[in-house]
Image: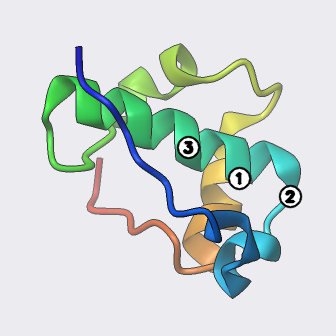
Amino acid sequence: MTWTKLSDDHFDREEIFALSRSAALLDIEAKVWCNRLGNDGHVPAAQLARLTTSPDPEADVAELVAGQVWEVDGN
């Protein structure tokens, strides 16, 4: 079992604080998933729905990209 650490000021960071609750949660869900798989933070688009119960994960991804928390690499 792996552990994913977040700093105690994670939600105070400007780029995270500006996110909706849904996008901020997706960011954490993805970090935990990626850490478990050891895939260096890469989330394939086809796997996105497996990570979250968000009703609109694509909108959350768009918000994360617009906030410069995530980058899109073509997949």
Instruction: For the residues labelled 2 and 3, say whether their Cβ atoms are less than 8 Å apart.
Output: no
Colouring used for the render: rainbow
Q: Position of residue 57 (x, y in %)?
A: 68, 36
Read off the residue under disc 1: 24
| Residue located at (56% from left, 20% from top) | 49
Read off the residue under disc 2: 20
Q: Amino acid at mark 2?
A: Ser
Can see residue 59? no
The local crowd at label 2, few if under 14, some if 14 to 19, many if 20 or more residues have their Cα within 10 Å, is few
Report, in whole angstroms, how far the alpha carbon at label 1 lies from the one at label 3.
7 Å
Relative depth, front residue between 44 and 26? 26
Q: In terms of image quadrants, where is residue 71?
A: bottom left
* Mark 2 vs mark 3: in front: 3
Q: Amino acid at mark 3?
A: Ile
Would you place residue 16 above or below residue 26 in this image? below
Residue 8's label in the rendered image is none
Does residue 10 appear to the left or right of 36 in the view shown? Answer: right
Task: Identify the secondary structure beneath mark 3.
Answer: helix
| Residue located at (39% from left, 24% from top) | 46
Q: Position of residue 65 (x, y in %)?
A: 55, 69
| Residue located at (51% from left, 63% from top) | 7
Q: Residue furthest front?
A: 8
Would you place residue 73 above or below residue 48 in this image? below
Rendered-image quadrant of the N terminus: top left
Can see residue 8? yes
The local crowd at label 3, few if under 14, some if 14 to 19, many if 20 or more residues have their Cα within 10 Å, is some
Relative depth, front residue between 40 and 45? 40
Would you place residue 66 above or below residue 14 in this image? above
Task: Identify the secondary structure beneath mark 2.
Answer: loop
Read off the residue under disc 3: 28
Does residue 27 appear to the left or right of 75 in the view shown? Answer: right
